[in-house]
Image (tube, helix red, strand yellow):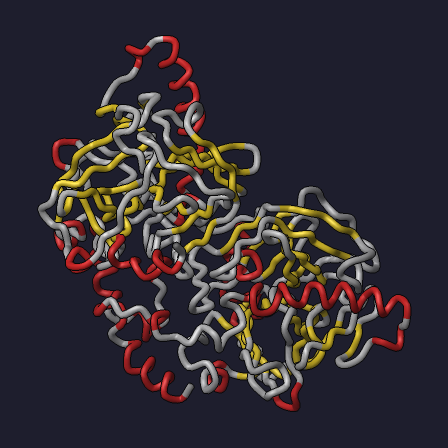
């Protein structure tokens, strides 16, 4: 750890300018948030269920920690996270009758994506009693970074309002002068359903512990790069701390005669909760605007900034952003790019247009306009994706890599605002809503460092529920290999395909379309997207009004190399102005993610 700390401190000042990603050298096994449900939440869920059953038969079974009485922490929420065939455990804080605050890693931990939460309120047991509601309405912070445990906060919306009682009530948020209080030296109370001691012991009931808040400077001696100003830490002295399974739960202090929420349990050291290491929380005061926006409260909107002025400002900031704790996403104009909030801006409205266009095209084939339509089997690797949202659908594309894997964009699954519930994957068809092989799945692995607000690491792997058979109309696309892995492909002609718009103004063809595009250098591409374009992107020219268009997200960018077609890009984002204004299109560069991809094949 000491060697790692020295290395990271040497890297941090140049990481932005040199394209060195800190997450590449962070030891992800040291922190509990990354892969949380695999390491902690999953194994713990069954232990808690068994402990509760045993405690009901033999109350003297409860050991370790301090157990809570019913109504002592009426704001405490227990969360049972439904995974694919198993459950994980977390906590949360009830803010009002419809909102529960928790940690982003409880919903997506960088490896595991929850399908739903069962929210337990007004109970000191997780698997019985209280008010119990199931929801999939979860908004993670748009810049949640699992591999660095940054912006580890999420808001759950309950399906209906809960009524308050002695056992169920809201926790207050900091306000006024409390917003500037660092709380160092204060005594805070953490509560949760997790372990009460190292070694796997669970109490079978809600537990709590009083902890001294320490300065971030002290906390950084254990977590030198991970701890940011947006974190708050408590001491682990005396073997007292939060423990495995408390993630997402509240850290509360008394202020002015009332209890206020100051932290959301984020991560600790994998060594355990009795080794004296600090515990790290998301600092509520750092996210008060984000929280209030999701509570429906009035907030101040920043005045829109001219893109050229913004670009100059960002270029001045980028060299010092890591060392100064300046977050670029705070000043990025998110409306300029199509990936952030994609399903609201693009995917959702487009889904119904495509369905109607396909029906009309079947009745009148001459209806198809714009672009070049594909013949059946011309792009056998093309996947169409219908993303199921709560009450509506979104549209994306993908690339079939083998009989069980489809590569797409991370923003097709979670776009920073909307979380898909499932994908209907359409293969071997030139229509999205009919024909071909159609499979529904919720098994999606986003890149662990997907950042919606900066559109970084915009790549995800879909696992199909069963293997598909190849045919003339359905086949795999090859990945780059050998010398191709070092090829930038600038100057090459690439082919993009998708079910999206064929021209600005909302026209859809009712069939799969494609376009040939020249690959440009990233230097040229950065003139339009000065901060967003990284070495892990590949770009195509928009000259002549030819480009990918709304709805093509996640789809393939392919070049011919050595007599075969290879996948070089995954459609990521364009300019919100449209696809005929001459702006470049930006893709995730496949060669930059080849190790990540191969691991998931």
| Front residue of this view, candidates 410 and 218 | 410
Q: Quadrant of the N terminus?
A: bottom left
Picture residue at 43% right of the left edge, 46% below the top:
404
Q: 564 above or below 221?
A: above
| Front residue of this view, candidates 519 and 523 | 519
How many numbered marks appear? Answer: 0
Tell me residue 170's x, y (percent): 71, 58
Picture residue at 46% right of the left edge, 47% below the top:
463
Q: Quadrant of the C terminus?
A: bottom left
Name the outermost residue toward the left: 491
Tell me residue 414's x, y (percent): 45, 48
Q: Quadrant of residue 564?
A: top left
Left or right: 542, with 2 as reference point? left
Name the outermost residue toward the bottom: 238
Picture residue at 69% right of the left edge, 81% below the top:
197
Residue 55 appears in the picture as rendered:
yes
Tell me residue 100's x, y (percent): 64, 55
Residue 306 appears in the picture as rendered:
no
Q: 598 above or below 160?
A: below
Q: Quadrant of residue 534?
A: bottom left
| Front residue of this view, candidates 69 and 257 | 69
| Front residue of this view, candidates 518 and 282 | 518
Tell me residue 98's x, y (percent): 67, 48
Left or right: 202, with 5 as reference point? right
Left or right: 17, with 208 as reference point? left
């Amino acid at each position: 750890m000491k060697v790692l700390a020295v290395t990271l401190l040497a890297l941090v000042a140049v990481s932005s300018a040199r394209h060195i990603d800190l997450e590449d050298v962070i030891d992800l096994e040291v922190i509990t948030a990354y892969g949380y449900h695999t390491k902690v939440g999953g194994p713990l869920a069954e232990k808690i269920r068994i402990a509760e059953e045993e405690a009901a038969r033999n109350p003297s079974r409860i050991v370790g920690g301090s157990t809570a009485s019913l109504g002592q922490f009426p704001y405490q929420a227990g969360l049972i996270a439904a995974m694919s065939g198993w459950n994980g455990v977390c906590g949360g804080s009830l803010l009002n009758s419809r909102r529960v605050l928790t940690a982003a890693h409880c919903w997506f931990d960088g490896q595991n994506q929850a399908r739903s939460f069962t929210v337990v309120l007004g109970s000191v047991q997780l698997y019985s009693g209280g008010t119990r509601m199931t929801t999939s309405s979860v908004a993670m912070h748009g810049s949640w970074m699992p591999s660095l445990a940054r912006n580890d906060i999420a808001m759950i919306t309950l399906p209906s309002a809960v009524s308050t009682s002695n056992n169920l009530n809201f926790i207050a948020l900091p306000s006024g002068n409390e917003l500037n209080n660092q709380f160092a030296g204060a005594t805070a109370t953490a509560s949760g359903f997790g372990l009460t001691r190292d070694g796997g012991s669970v109490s079978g009931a809600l537990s709590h512990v009083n902890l001294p808040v320490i300065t971030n400077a002290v906390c950084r001696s254990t977590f030198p790069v991970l701890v940011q100003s947006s974190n708050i830490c408590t001491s682990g002295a005396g073997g007292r701390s939060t423990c495995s399974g408390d993630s997402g739960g509240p850290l509360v202090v008394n202020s002015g005669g009332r209890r206020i929420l100051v932290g959301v349990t984020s991560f600790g050291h994998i060594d355990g909760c009795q080794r004296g290491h600090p515990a790290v929380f998301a600092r509520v005061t750092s996210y008060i605007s984000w929280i209030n926006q999701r509570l429906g409260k009035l907030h101040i909107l920043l005045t829109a900034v001219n893109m050229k002025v913004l670009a100059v400002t960002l270029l001045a900031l980028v060299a010092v952003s890591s060392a100064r704790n300046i977050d670029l996403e705070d000043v990025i104009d998110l409306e300029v790019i199509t990936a952030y909030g994609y399903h609201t801006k693009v995917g959702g409205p487009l889904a119904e247009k495509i369905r109607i266009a396909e029906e009309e095209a079947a009745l009148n084939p001459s209806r198809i306009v714009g672009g070049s339509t594909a013949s059946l089997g011309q792009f056998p690797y093309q996947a169409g994706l219908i993303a199921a949202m709560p009450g509506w659908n979104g549209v994306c594309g993908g690339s079939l890599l083998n009989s069980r894997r489809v590569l797409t964009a991370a923003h097709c699954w979670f776009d920073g605002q909307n979380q898909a519930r499932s994908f209907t994957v359409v293969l071997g068809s030139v229509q999205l809503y009919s024909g071909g092989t159609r499979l529904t799945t919720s098994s999606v692995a986003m890149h662990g460092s997907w950042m919606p607000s900066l559109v970084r690491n915009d790549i995800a792997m879909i696992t199909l529920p069963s293997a598909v058979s190849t045919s003339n109309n359905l086949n795999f696309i090859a990945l780059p290999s050998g010398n191709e892995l070092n090829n930038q492909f600038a100057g090459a002609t690439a082919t993009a395909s998708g079910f999206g718009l064929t021209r600005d103004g909302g026209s859809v063809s009712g069939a799969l379309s494609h376009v040939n595009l020249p690959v440009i250098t990233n230097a040229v591409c950065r003139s339009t997207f000065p901060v967003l374009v990284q070495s892990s992107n590949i770009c195509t020219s928009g000259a002549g009004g030819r480009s990918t268009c709304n709805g093509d997200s996640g789809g393939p960018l392919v070049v011919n190399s050595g007599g075969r077609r290879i996948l070089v890009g995954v459609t990521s984002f364009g300019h919100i102005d449209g696809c005929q204004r001459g702006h470049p299109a930006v893709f995730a560069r496949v060669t930059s993610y080849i190790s990540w991809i191969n691991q998931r094949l």
